[in-house]
């Protein structure tokens, strides 16, 4: 399929996703495509079941040839997102039109065998589908893993053999697999459905057992030349700091990961075995706990200021278990970020909204229609900006991205990520942070 035809097909699907059923004439007007081009695009979409053709009852009663309506077929298949986190497996299921059906997750011990992780994912998906996934029920699978992932993952060794992981998932589910870094996928999900929905430039930082993130530039998920984009945990914040697993020293991950914060608390005389116990001590008025969290938050804010002064995002979204501790962490981050920003910068700081499901939902967002016979998987995010106007909540239309043509009221999705994913309450970290 030629590049132009692929772009045109994406545009047609985008219009149907936003506006609901449309006639061919309406599609021609809205897309700007010629009648011949539109028909060449629509025929294979109808043949493979991605698009349905129907005649409304009102049209049937009129004289003359009834006007047919084209619509996306929500029953054409299901797509799956899987996040293989360091100590958990999380999954999300959705229709090929990105209407989220549900999410689920399960913890496991560090270093659990990959065969067991894949089996856990299969079982969780079966729970969401109310039964064992039958062959062909899963049209495509997006997978999030830790570590560097470039566009051509089948040729990369990866920390656990990413090509092997992709092959195991493909064999177990019997469906095509696309794979990316799970922190980048969480960034993609937050830009589509979460705290930065509708924003075209955002930076995401996850503070968990590891520290990483992702960057969305002009609506496009940035991978980098070698799949290393988003390795924010390896920014040096203390040249004399402890050794890091990356081979460096004093990286952000050595002071801002859950394990690092717990270690600092114990070194200062605390006795928390895990993060919940540290939070309990904090709420009980433990000054050591507050000081340790404030110190970590300050270093995080300084690192974010450095990143913001480099890439100038409109929104910074911070997520992960450490961020969810609340003001004891977020307020120091906000102060240090504000002090470190260049004059005139107006960057908004926000707490992530999608929680632990973020990376699995981002894996779903990877799966865009594109190929006849399976979900129409487009090129990797970042390779096609022709119709990159859908980084918003399902059914929403921003005034500055309206498709040319007659004004129509958008038809909201019957079930969107906003209703399928538990939403967290808004926080005070949603105002512009300026210097």
Image: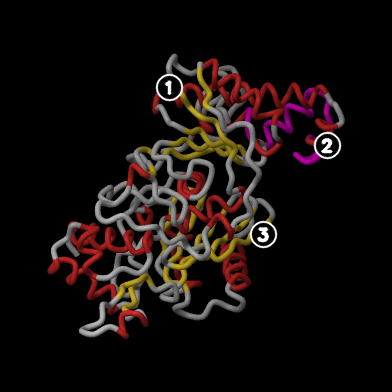
Of tags 2 and 3, the one toward the viewer is: 2
Please, is residue 361 above or below residue 235 in the view?
below
**Quadrant in which residue 326 is drawn:** top right
Position in image of residue 240 (x %, y %): 59, 17
Residues in magenta?
Answer: 255-278
Comparing 224 with 297, the one in front is: 297
Residue extending farthest to the right is: 284
Check residue 309 in the rendering and tell me which mark sits there, or answer none: 1
- Asked if the magenta segment contains residue 273, the reply would be yes
Q: CA gap, disc 2 to disc 3?
A: 24 Å
**Mark 1: few/some/many CA within 10 Å (<14, 14-19, 20+):** some
In the rendered image, residue 208, in percent from the top left (x then y), is placed at 63, 40
Q: 230 or 28, which is in the foreground?
A: 28
Residue drawn 35% across and 71% down?
Answer: 71
Q: Nearer the viewer, mark 1 or mark 3?
A: 1
Q: Residue at x 51, y 55 (%)?
A: 361
Q: Secondary structure at mark 2?
A: helix
The span from disc 1 to disc 2 (Cα, nearest Å) is: 36 Å
The earlier-in-sequence mark between 1 and 3 is 3
Which label is found at residue 251?
none
> Is 91 on the left-hand or right-hand side of 61?
right
Q: Tell me: 198 left or right of 237.
A: left
The residue where tag 2 is placed is 280
Q: Position of residue 418 (x, y in %)?
A: 56, 55
Q: Residue 429 in magenta?
A: no
Q: Position of residue 229 (x, y in %)?
A: 41, 38
CA separation, marks 1 and 3? Answer: 38 Å
């Amino acid at each position: 399929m030629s590049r132009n035809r692929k772009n045109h097909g994406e545009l047609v699907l985008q219009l149907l996703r936003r506006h609901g059923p449309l006639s061919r004439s309406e599609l021609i007007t809205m897309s700007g495509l010629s009648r011949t081009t539109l028909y060449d695009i629509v025929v294979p979409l109808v043949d493979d079941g991605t698009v349905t053709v129907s005649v409304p009852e009102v049209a049937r009663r009129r004289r003359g040839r009834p006007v047919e309506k084209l619509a996306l077929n929500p029953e054409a298949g299901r797509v799956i997102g899987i996040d293989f986190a360091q100590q958990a497996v999380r999954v999300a299921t959705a229709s090929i039109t990105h209407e989220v059906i549900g999410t689920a997750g399960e913890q496991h011990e560090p270093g659990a065998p990959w065969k067991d992780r894949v089996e856990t994912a299969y079982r969780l998906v079966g729970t969401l589908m109310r039964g064992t996934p039958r062959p062909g029920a899963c049209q495509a699978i997006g997978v999030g893993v830790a570590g560097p992932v470039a566009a051509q993952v089948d040729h990369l060794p990866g920390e656990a053999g990413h090509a092997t992981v992709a092959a195991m998932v493909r064999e177990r589910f019997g469906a095509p697999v696309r794979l990316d870094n799970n922190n980048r996928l969480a960034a993609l999900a937050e830009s589509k459905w979460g705290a930065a929905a509708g924003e075209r430039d955002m930076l995401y930082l996850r503070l968990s057992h590891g520290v990483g993130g992702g960057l969305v530039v002009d609506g496009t998920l940035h991978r980098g030349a070698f799949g290393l984009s988003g390795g924010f945990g390896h920014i040096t914040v203390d040249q004399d700091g402890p050794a890091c697993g990356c081979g460096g020293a004093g990286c952000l991950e050595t002071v801002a990961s859950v394990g690092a914060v717990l270690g600092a608390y114990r070194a200062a005389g605390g006795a928390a075995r895990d993060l919940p116990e540290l939070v309990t001590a904090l709420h009980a008025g433990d000054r050591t706990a507050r000081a340790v969290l404030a110190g970590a938050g300050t270093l995080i804010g300084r690192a974010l200021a450095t990143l913001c002064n480099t890439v100038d995002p409109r929104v910074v979204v911070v997520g992960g278990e450490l961020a969810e501790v609340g003001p004891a962490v977020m307020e120091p981050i906000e102060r240090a970020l504000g002090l470190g920003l260049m004059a005139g910068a107006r960057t908004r700081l926000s707490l992530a909204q999608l929680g632990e499901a973020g990376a699995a939902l981002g894996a779903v967002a990877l799966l865009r229609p594109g190929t006849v016979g399976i979900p129409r998987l487009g090129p990797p995010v970042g390779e096609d900006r022709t119709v990159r106007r859908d980084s918003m909540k399902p059914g929403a239309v921003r005034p500055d991205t309206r498709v040319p043509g007659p004004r129509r009221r958008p038809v909201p999705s019957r079930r969107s990520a906003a209703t399928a994913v538990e939403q967290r309450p808004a926080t005070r970290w949603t105002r512009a942070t300026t210097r």
